[in-house]
């Protein structure tokens, strides 16, 4: 019976026919459960629970991502045989926003995707062990005992360290958490939404009707609660509830936790659908997704083009330019932005917008029926978009690109809207072709200085080649002109000489 249930689970989970081949995948997930981000007073959150580290991932959050990684292993390694059994840095390109909670979420998820039992870390020879000691003094009994216990493994438990790339303004990848250049515009949009959207006005009224009296007693004050307070209060309550805190004082205030939880999740849903992203143009959503959607399309094309051309990338060293999977660790805001744009582009009613709770995941899976025909085009590849394993959109790759591309803002559009330094922006790729070339170089492990040096060297070489070619052309033309002049002189001399010779009479 358990086996039958497991089979039914897999059947419902893997909605793509088994005959289809998985070609490329991008997963974008929210970090796991964390501590509240803001405190009411003295490290007490808005529910008066004590925390030490605001915003940091909790043990519950780590477990969430470990299990999400295990689930992805079942799907992408066990079921589809898409990834190798052990981690290969050339297969997966990992991005994270610059926050501890997103970085730790990636690390936790990788523990589930590549469990300790199947990890195959580096093993050192005796000579390598001797040369592995750092330059500081490590020659002591305690350290030597640890070295012996490693049994040649580079790290304990054959641990594997995965590289994670940071998304930040230095790379010009705008996010709602890293958008200081757009802060005034962002705040103006949110302010306008909060004052004009009826859904938000009704939420504030409902909260005060339900909880104002009890919370005034709880906080020992008299006031009306606004949208900002409700956001911070619900954030604290959801994190406390997820961490299974007792919340004794809030319970004594006579508040029903289950009803409050339902309200707070409804509020968070409206928070992103209406408050943050509620303007008709969905400006902040465009700012959020444009950079990474461009990245996704770039790497997707790389793999699909290779598949169309019959390239065996799995057995060919390609450095980091053609990964088969992207993993992006982000926030509820980043996933919400993807949802809003995709729903708008593909005609899905925004009322069905879902709030991404802790460890939620969206996935873009590119598949193809490899038995269909030989001369394939982008129309033969299907993109399936999942929200927490529920299939939301299924469309051929060409249609997806055609529909989503007009909604991807260029660097110039972002710079113009945010008022960023246009000169600096011009230094980055406005032309998509140039941007693709930059990404290939970047993912081959070059740092920015090396890239610039490489470009400078190439520029010098190109200038030298052009100079040599022009010199050769100039010399060639000069030689031809010299020969022509000599020939003309000879002909002229010949004519003068002939004129001196008397003509014979007939």
Image (spheres, rainbow, N blue to C red):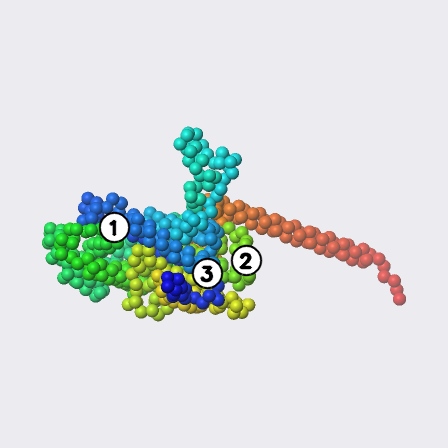
Q: Is residue 164 left or right of residue 49?
A: right
> Within 10 angstroms of label 3, few (less than 14), some, or many (20 or more) residues?
some
Question: In the depicted view, which residue is nearer to us: 172 or 323?
Answer: 323
Residue 195 is at least partly visible in this image: no
Query: Can you say whether 160 is above or below 380 in the image?
Result: above
Image location (x, y in percent) of residue 199: 22, 65
For residue 341, what is the image quadrant? bottom left
Question: In the depicted view, which residue is nearer to us: 278 or 427?
Answer: 278
Can you tell which of label 3 and label 1 is closer to the viewer?
Answer: 3
Residue placed farthest to the front in the image? 1
Query: Is disc 1 placed on a helix, strand or loop?
Result: loop
The residues tagged by marks 3 and 1 sit, at their Cα atoms, a distance apart of 38 Å
For residue 145, what is the image quadrant? top left
The residues tagged by marks 3 and 2 sit, at their Cα atoms, a distance apart of 17 Å
Image location (x, y in percent) of residue 236: 22, 52
Label for residue 80?
A: 3
The structure residue drawn at horizontal position 48% and vertical position 39%, both measured from the top left corner, is: 152
Query: Is disc 2 placed on a helix, strand or loop?
Result: loop
Name the residue tied to disc 1. 36
Name the residue tied to disc 2. 312
The residues tagged by marks 2 and 1 sit, at their Cα atoms, a distance apart of 47 Å
Q: Earlier in the sequence, mark 2 or mark 1?
A: 1
Residue 1 is at least partly visible in this image: yes
Question: In the depicted view, which residue is nearer to us: 71 or 180?
Answer: 71
Q: Is residue 418 left or right of residue 504?
A: left
């Amino acid at each position: 019976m358990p086996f039958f249930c497991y089979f039914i689970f897999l059947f419902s989970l893997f909605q793509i026919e088994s005959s289809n081949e998985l070609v490329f995948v991008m997963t974008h997930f929210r970090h796991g459960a964390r501590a509240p981000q803001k405190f009411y007073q003295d490290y007490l959150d808005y529910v008066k629970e004590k925390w030490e580290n605001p915003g940091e991932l909790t043990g519950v959050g780590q477990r969430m991502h470990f299990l999400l990684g295990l689930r992805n292993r079942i799907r992408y390694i066990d079921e589809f045989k898409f990834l190798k059994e052990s981690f290969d840095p050339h297969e997966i390109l990992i991005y994270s926003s610059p926050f501890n909670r997103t970085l730790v979420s990636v690390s936790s998820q990788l523990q589930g995707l590549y469990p300790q039992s199947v990890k195959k870390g580096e093993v050192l020879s005796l000579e390598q062990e001797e040369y592995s000691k750092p330059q500081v003094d490590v020659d002591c009994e305690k350290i030597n005992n640890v070295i012996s216990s490693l049994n040649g493994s580079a790290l304990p438990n054959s641990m594997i360290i995965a590289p994670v790339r940071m998304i930040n303004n230095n790379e010009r990848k705008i996010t709602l958490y890293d958008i200081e250049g757009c802060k005034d515009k962002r705040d103006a949009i949110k302010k306008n939404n909060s004052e004009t959207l009826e859904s938000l006005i009704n939420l504030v009224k409902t909260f005060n009707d339900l909880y104002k009296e009890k919370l005034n007693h709880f906080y020992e004050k008299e006031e009306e609660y606004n949208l900002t307070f409700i956001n911070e209060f619900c954030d604290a309550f959801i994190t406390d509830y997820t961490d299974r805190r007792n919340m004794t004082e809030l319970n004594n205030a006579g508040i029903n936790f289950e009803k409050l939880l339902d309200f707070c999740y409804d509020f968070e849903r409206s928070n992103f659908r209406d408050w943050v992203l509620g303007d008709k143009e969905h400006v902040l959503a465009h700012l959020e997704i444009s950079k990474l959607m461009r990245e996704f399309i770039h790497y997707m094309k790389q793999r699909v083009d290779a598949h169309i051309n019959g390239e065996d990338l799995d057995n060919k060293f390609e450095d980091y330019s053609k990964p088969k999977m992207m993993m992006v660790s982000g926030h509820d805001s980043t996933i919400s932005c993807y949802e809003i744009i995709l729903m708008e582009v593909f005609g899905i009613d925004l009322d069905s917008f879902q709030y991404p709770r802790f460890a939620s995941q969206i996935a873009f899976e590119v598949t193809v029926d490899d038995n269909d025909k030989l001369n394939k085009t982008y129309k033969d590849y299907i993109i399936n978009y999942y929200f927490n394993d529920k299939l939301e959109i299924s469309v051929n790759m060409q249609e997806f690109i055609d529909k989503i591309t007009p909604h991807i803002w260029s660097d110039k559009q972002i710079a113009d809207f945010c008022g960023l330094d246009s000169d600096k922006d011009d230094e980055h790729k406005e032309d998509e072709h140039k941007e693709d070339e930059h990404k290939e170089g970047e993912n081959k492990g070059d740092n920015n200085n090396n890239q610039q040096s490489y470009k400078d060297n190439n520029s010098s070489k190109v200038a030298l080649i052009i100079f040599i070619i022009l010199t050769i052309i100039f010399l060639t033309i000069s030689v031809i002109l010299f020969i022509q002049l000599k020939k003309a002189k000879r002909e002229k001399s010949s004519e003068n000489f002939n004129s001196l010779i008397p003509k014979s009479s007939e």
